[in-house]
């Protein structure tokens, strides 16, 4: 092999290897941005369908979506993803939420697919697609084996990674619906009624309140670094490469911010006599409405259709299920 061929093979190999890393990062930092992550991880008051649902119904929705995606063929998970993504248009600032959900879904699908495609052993692909003939579309240089890569990137490996990715996207979208349309207090009261252990409930509520603040702190720290000259000489194409050192530089300020916030949360819990009594009463009760019964009916229908699909052979059986 001449020097030109060697350079070509290595250049294309590194482009393909970095594709699954840089494209999701580009979508996260440029298309979604830290502001976008704040929007999809914090509650905003609204009056549309999801905002009228009991948090218990939205928790059940997440469980049902997870069950459907886990027991059925991949394209059913893809259909559920598309349907959930379409309902984002019904949220506050629906067009913006729909665009953010689309970018997040695409970034998750590409990242998940490219995480599995080069690494999946041929034995798993042989079993999953019920074939011993794998179609190679690229041969990696031998030193890529140090990183765990299989000798060849196969078409079946890409198919397999995409199919697995479709099981993640729907679950993420359903979980974000709960976060964006329910207050932490509502979720706390709901989980208390469901007899979920208090330590687990408290950890979940703290996480819901902390995640948007983390993105806010990262955004402030990153903007301060930009004001100090980070990436000042970069153009629109190379500026994305400054996001990673900017995010690394924000780690220590964000950790300090979180530690201070943890102290304030502890003081707040003590002053409100958290866990001073085995049970607690609440001023506002959360009841089920007509919207809840409508959603419950949709979930039951979805589970019934999933059972029918499994009986027809569209479940997670061993063997080739078709792309």
Image (spheres, rainbow, N blue to C red):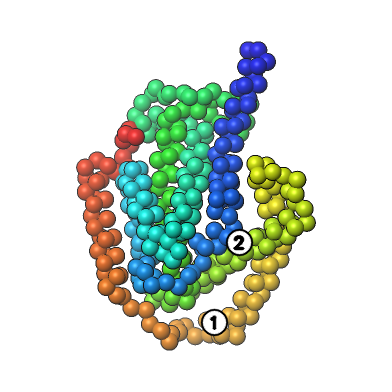
Would you say 70 lies left or right of 255 here? left
Would you say 204 lies left or right of 144 here? left
Other-residue count near label 2 (Cα within 10 Å), few / some / many at <14 / 14–19 / ≥20: many
Query: Residue 299, how many percent across, how many down?
Result: 28, 60
Query: Residue 167, how many percent across, how many down?
Result: 40, 47
Query: Residue 150, how many percent across, how many down?
Result: 53, 29
Q: CA distance from mark 1 to mark 2?
A: 27 Å
Which image quadrant is residue 139 in? top right
- Residue sitting at x 40%, y 74%: 190
- Residue sitting at x 41%, y 64%: 91
Which image quadrant is residue 237 in? top right
Q: Which mark, by number, is residue 215?
A: 2
Q: Quadrant of the C terminus?
A: top left
- Residue sitting at x 75%, y 58%: 227
Q: In the rendered view, would you say 14 is above or below 309?
A: above
- Judge depth for marks 1 and 2 and give the one in front: 2
Q: Is residue 191 visible?
A: no
Please name the residue that numbered disc 1 is placed on. 274
Question: Which residue sits furthest right?
Answer: 228
- Residue sitting at x 65%, y 12%: 2
| Residue in the foreground of this view, choosing between 285 and 26 | 26
């Amino acid at each position: 092999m001449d020097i030109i061929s060697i350079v070509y093979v290595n250049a294309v190999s590194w482009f393909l290897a970095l594709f699954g890393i840089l494209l999701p990062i580009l979508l996260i930092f440029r298309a979604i941005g830290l502001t976008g992550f704040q929007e999809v991880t914090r509650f905003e008051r609204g009056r549309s369908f999801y905002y009228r649902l009991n948090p218990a119904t939205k928790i059940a929705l997440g469980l049902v979506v997870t069950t459907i995606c886990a027991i059925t063929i991949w394209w059913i998970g893809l259909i559920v993803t598309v349907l959930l993504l379409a309902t984002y248009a019904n949220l506050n600032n629906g067009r913006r939420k729909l665009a953010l959900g689309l970018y997040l879904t695409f970034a998750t699908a590409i990242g998940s697919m490219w995480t599995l495609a080069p690494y999946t052993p041929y034995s798993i692909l042989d079993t999953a697609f019920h074939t011993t003939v794998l179609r190679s579309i690229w041969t990696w240089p031998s030193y890529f084996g140090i990183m765990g890569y299989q000798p060849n990137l196969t078409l079946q490996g890409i198919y397999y990674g995409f199919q697995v990715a479709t099981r993640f996207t729907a679950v993420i979208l359903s979980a974000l619906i709960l976060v964006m349309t329910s207050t932490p207090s509502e979720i706390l009261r709901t989980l208390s009624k469901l007899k979920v252990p208090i330590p687990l409930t408290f950890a979940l509520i703290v996480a819901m309140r902390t995640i948007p603040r983390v993105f806010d702190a990262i955004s402030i720290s990153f903007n301060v670094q930009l004001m100090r000259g980070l990436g000042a000489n970069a153009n629109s194409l190379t500026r994305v490469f400054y996001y990673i050192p900017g995010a690394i530089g924000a780690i220590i300020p964000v950790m300090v911010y979180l530690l201070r916030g943890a102290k304030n949360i502890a003081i707040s819990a003590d002053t409100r006599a958290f866990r001073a009594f085995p049970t607690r009463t609440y001023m506002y009760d959360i009841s089920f409405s007509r919207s809840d019964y409508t959603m419950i009916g949709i979930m039951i229908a979805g589970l019934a259709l999933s059972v029918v699909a499994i009986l027809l052979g569209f479940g997670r059986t061993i063997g080739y299920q078709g792309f």
